[in-house]
Image: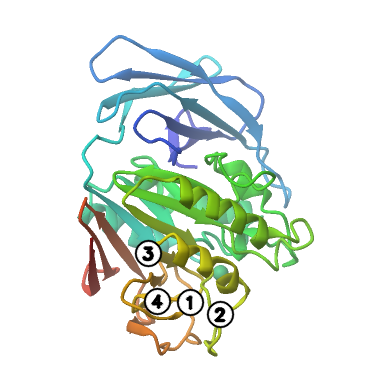
Amino acid sequence: MHIGFGTDVGQIMHVVTADMKHEHTISWKTEKFGESGNLEVRPKQSQNIIKVNAEVVELPVYNGGKHFGLYTAHVTNLTAGTDYEYRISVGKRQSAWMQFKTEPELTSFKALIFGDSQSLDYKYWGKTARVAWQKNGDAAFFVNMGDLVDNGQDEWQWNAWFDEGAKLLEAIPVVPVMGNHEAYSLDWKMAKPDYYLSFFSLPANGPAGLERYAYSYDYGDVHFVVLDTQLNELHDWYPDLLKEQQRWLAKDLSQTRKRWKVVLMHRGIWIHPFDGPLDDIGQTFVPVFDQYHVDLVFTGHVHSYARTKALKNGKPDPAGTIYITTGRSGEKVWDKSPQKPMDEFYYNPLDMPNYLVFEASYDALKVAAFKQTGELIDQTEIKK
Ligand SMILES: [Fe+2]
């Protein structure tokens, strides 16, 4: 375990909130389960401490592993654009003061986006994360596009994913997107993604009954919506997964006043390999994306990087939405997703993993894709 304090407390993680100007969520893990914990937060060099109790849950134990306790504390009423110090406690033990920042009132920001990190050896993901963070230490948060791990109920994989990504997870909020591999059991059957849902205390503003499967949040001038595309994996529990999200998505997008709208979801809008028409996901969500003028849709799953022309109803239209498949940040490659007719740029990162840098300002969104070495693959800009 990556050490927080003592030898049994660690994996400190910042998690996205619906309002990153005024709210902050931090979680941490222990190898024992049962002690209480809390979070103390103060503006830097101030003695005005806000203390909140942590909620403690026992993480699922599947393969005879340890009984980990996960502590999550959610602090509200913070001030935008402020440097805060925080420390965590378990029982009578306390960490040193560490730091985080709330979202500033400024509208320009940068975020990192990582395609599938699933691996056998998570060092691949670790190197991608470290290089991206070294070169973009001003990123406000990072997104992982799903298939964070190869098997979502396998504890060692989550520990390896965390330990390799610790530099990022300890520094800026993570925005996780659920992938199909989060919804498999140890014997590779469909499973409710219990570990994922316990691990990430996400904004509970999604569709009723599907809270934290889907959610939305704002940053700067951008409204982000995270959708769940596990229609096959979750069918036994949520047969109307797509329809319920479709209704919620339309309402969510109709209510935002933000200038830019970006959707993050694991699977794309066509089946792979591509054969033409929109698939169930595309048929459900694309009419809503078109109606509410979603600017960008990021997806994962196929482990290649591809950027389409602007599309409406899946067909080129300058007023439409650009779809970007984000490649892979982990070890696993896939060579069965060739270039689609509507792709303006296509690159399959067979030689090494890649990452994306997303920059947003009042009048432009920029996306750039880089190899794990930092070498540029592609960049684009949308102006409004
Ligand atoms: Fe996937």
**Mark 1 residue type:** Asn
Whether residue 223 can be seen here? yes
Q: Neighbour class for label 2 at 10 Å: few (<14), some, many (≥20)?
A: some
Whether residue 124 can be seen here? no
The residue depicted at 55 percent of the width and 60 percent of the height is 149
* C-alpha separation, residue under disc 3 versus residue under disc 1: 14 Å
Q: Secondary structure at mark 3?
A: strand
Which disc is residue 313 wearing?
Answer: 1
Identify the residue position indicated by label 3 in the image.
296
Identify the residue position indicated by label 2 in the image.
278
Residues at marks 1 and 4 touching, judged by CB atoms closer than 8 Å: yes
Splitting the image into four quadrants, where does ligand 1 fall? bottom right
Residues at marks 1 and 2 touching, judged by CB atoms closer than 8 Å: yes
**Mark 4 residue type:** Leu
Q: Nearer the viewer, residue 360 or 201?
A: 360
In percent of width and height, residue 104 lies at: 25, 35
